[in-house]
Amino acid sequence: MQYDHIIIRYGEIALKGKNRKVFTNQLSDNIAKKLKQFSAIKISMHRDRMYIVLNGENPKKIIEKCKNIFGIQSLSLAVKTTNEVTDIKEAALNVLTKEPNVKTFKVTTKRANKEFPIGSQEFNHVLGGHLLSNTNDYKVDVHQPDIEIRVDIRKKATYITSKKILGAGGLPVGSSGKTLLLMSGGIDSPVAGYLTMKRGVQVEAIHFHSPPYTSERAKQKVLDLAERLTEFGGKVKVHVVPFTKLQQKIYREIPHGYSMTVMRRMMLRISEHIAKQEGILSLTTGESLGQVASQTMESMNAINEVTNFPIIRPLIAMDKEDIIKIAEHIETYEISIRPFEDCCTVFVPNAPKTKPKTDKVKYLEELIDFTNDFSETIANVQTIEVSEEEQKKKDLFDLL
Ligand code: ATP
Ligand code: MG
């Protein structure tokens, strides 16, 4: 008897009240999209869990894919059988003997179906006895077993599982709206995107580039990072903003101590504009308090002043080391450290103010008319849709 089902357990979704359906429907959609290539599978949705009916598809590959789907707390391979004691015994014996390197086991029965005639405790003994008398080398160990045979007796069927695999946690992407992620090509912003996705948010990205000061490869790097993010949240739109003209003007017209602050304010204004165009209600950045000059309390205050949009900063209280760990885990780190100049590094003055004053920034900005440059920049934004398909093609290419 082969494992024929995968049980998907919800984490936080299980705590949702009336609108739980919104979350479970989203999760089911996301799973279906992610597993599109496994055409035989069926997803069946229940109040407290989902089942993927394998119909002969490769469970290992499916579990690997599911590990990156937010909203899944844990997964288990399962054998489905009837509620007949003899069938349960046979299936449990199969599950036990199929696992390699197992010497000790424990049976845990959960009887959601109270019509089942034997109590959970008693059934643990009945089944444990059956397993012992039909095998040679196994022992029961209730404290630290090599394997736990879990028997879940439900209304219409019984599911037998052995291992719980940890899922990605969080909420299904798409269940908490959309954000526009300011993505630089550095280490931090993709991690910020990933963590926002984890809270159920769909991500679009905006990238400011300044050709010829920044190269085509710097832009490609951002597209590659976006591609990695599709692994966790489906397709990602990337809005590429031609920032050269505005940056040159800022650099030329604004005293150098303040040019970084003005440039950041401009980035936020443009981001807000694009977000509104796309019907997006928040911005997300990879800022982390105190990391660089633009991320001091005073800088953030002066920069943030241009927008009323909520700015999500998932990394604000994180240390760089912890951010890097996540970047490695989601495989963006290697892409982020490719050595191409970012528009902000090219134009950053030697000594940007770490404590800019908002009044002074506003005064300096009022002396210059940015209206035409702003409109021209917005008009020339290039939007590229990065999809998982491209990621898959690349995977395939890597294999050849
Ligand atoms: P990152 O590693 O994400 O580049 P950082 O530590 O280098 O972050 P900064 O360069 O100060 O920090 O940027 C802070 C945040 O501003 C970034 O996390 C990102 O959200 C946004 N940002 C910076 N440069 C760009 C850019 N060229 N395009 C879009 N967003 C940017
Ligand atoms: Mg940066």
Image: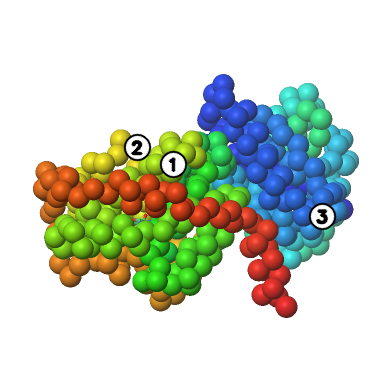
Image height of 150 relative to 189, above or below? above
Of residues 208 and 233, the one drawn nearer to the viewer in this rendering: 208
| Ligand 1 rendered quadrant | bottom left
Q: In the rendered image, which residue does mark 3 sit on? A: 57
Name the residue located 72 percent from the left edge and 45 percent from the top edge: 32
- Disc 2 marks a residue whose amino acid type is Phe
Name the residue located 77 percent from the left edge and 64 percent from the top edge: 137
Q: Earlier in the sequence, mark 3 or mark 2?
A: 3
Circle 1 — which element?
Answer: helix
Q: Can residue 185 be seen in this view?
A: yes
Q: x, y percentage for residue 44? A: 76, 37
- Disc 3 marks a residue whose amino acid type is Glu
- Disc 1 marks a residue whose amino acid type is Ala
In the figure, is residue 371 to the left or right of 337?
Answer: left
Of residues 199 and 143, the one drawn nearer to the viewer in this rendering: 199
- The answer as to whether callout 1 falls within 8 Å of ligand 1 is no
Q: Are marks 3 and 1 in contact (CB under 8 Å)?
A: no
Q: x, y percentage for residue 92? A: 80, 48
Q: In which quarter of the image is residue 156?
A: top right
Q: In the rendered image, which residue does mark 2 sit on? A: 309
Q: Earlier in the sequence, mark 1 or mark 2?
A: 1
- The answer as to whether callout 2 falls within 8 Å of ligand 1 is no
Q: Earlier in the sequence, mark 3 or mark 1?
A: 3
In the figure, is residue 289 to the left or right of 213?
Answer: left
Give the foreground label among 1 and 2.
1
Q: Are marks 1 and 2 in contact (CB under 8 Å)?
A: yes
